[in-house]
Amino acid sequence: MQNYSVQPEALKKFTTAIFEAAGLKNNEAASIAELLVHADLRNVHSHGVLRTIPYLEKIQGGGASKTSTYPVIKETTNTAVIDAQGGLGALVGEKAVALCREKAQKNLISMVVVKNSNHFGMGAHWALKLAGDDMIGVACSTTDLTMGPPGAKEPFMGNNPFAFAFKAGEKYPEFCVDMATSLVAMGKCKDMEKRGKEIPHGWMLDKDGNDTTSVKDCYMMTTMAGHKGFGIALVVELFATLLSGGVLSPDINNQDLADTPELSSQCFACFNISAFRDLQEFQKNAEEYIDRLHALPMKEGMGAAKYPGEIEYGCKQINEKEGIVLPETLVEDLIKTGEKLGVDGNFLKETVTDRQ
């Protein structure tokens, strides 16, 4: 299988054209493209342009509303509740982030929750947008049924992901924890399968609760850190669903149903650092802390210790210069999808690469 290298801006332009051809406004299509390409820039391919076709099928099938106005249905100086009305997670995310940052700039701490949404993409995208240069950003979401408590025979909730981000000075601009509460995200398994990579044991369970390495046989994902991952997933449910009045995890619809909205819930929060201390002093201390982390003695062959988000930020810097690596199977799928919508994607195959 060949891999291709595609320049980020060209991929973003192509992806924007795909969604615009599907009936979205240019700014809406561009927001989705930014979300997906940002994930690929950070090598989080499970949430990158791999999601173009499922998102497109959702729009075309009616499972993602093109007419939602994403109304704010309750609001205070520091908080808001948005009803996504079955619209796109990428679009309600943009509105929630802008509103959350505006409130935190005026009132120092803010939280915006969303109900009746769809897949919101890579959590880091939102946490980093929320953080900017001056805040701590937090984003989390419920998902369709993916896992249960350890030992359960049936899934009970999604692998509810969460992300935290802030700028740790000029040296470390993207400190970002972003993880699902399952051992890995299901999208990662789908991406590995698309790239012809072997999926490790211990990530997925079949209908009998036994280990499987086949995506088609996967019934549930394994929880992160056993009961601890299950507990964190329930905390996400508290902030995203119970505060918004949204649909509880056991009743969320399968995100792959093209004609049905997922009805997931999200939570976005901002903490203005200046409410607690001087911003420059905070960032100076954060830089020094990470410097000390990097200086830790490590076992032979392990390399320096890394802070959360360091690997992804490094990948982003490389991919911005050298291009995003896409597998042949995905490129073929994207070209075929473009052809159906009158969007030429043949340029995606122009540059073959040995990079993985």
Image: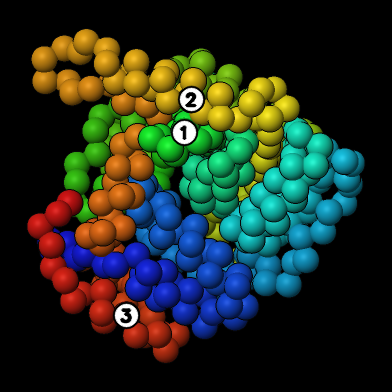
Q: Give how far across and how far down residue 22 sits, in percent.
A: 54, 79
Q: Which is nearer the N-term, disc 2 or disc 3?
A: 2
Dot 2 lies on which element? Answer: helix
Q: Counting residues from the N terminus, which is met first, the one under dot 3 or under dot 1? A: 1
Residue 245 seen in render: no
**Where does label 2 land, which residue?**
284
- Mark 3 neighbour class, 10 Å CA radius: few under 14, some 14 to 19, many 20 or more: many
Please name the residue shown 24% across and 33% down the image.
200
Toward the viewer: 119 or 290? 290
Tag 3's secondary structure? loop
User: Secondary structure beneath disc 1?
Assistant: loop
Looking at the image, tell me whether mark 1 or mark 2 is earlier in sequence order.
1
> Which amino acid type is shown beneath numbered disc 3?
Gly
In the rendered structure, the answer to whether residue 165 lies left or right of residue 318 reads right
Callout 1: few (<14), some (14-19), or many (20+) C-alpha neighbours within 10 Å? many
Residue assigned mark 3: 345
Left or right: 36 in relation to 135: left
Whether the residues at callouts 1 and 2 have beta carbons within 8 Å, the answer is: yes
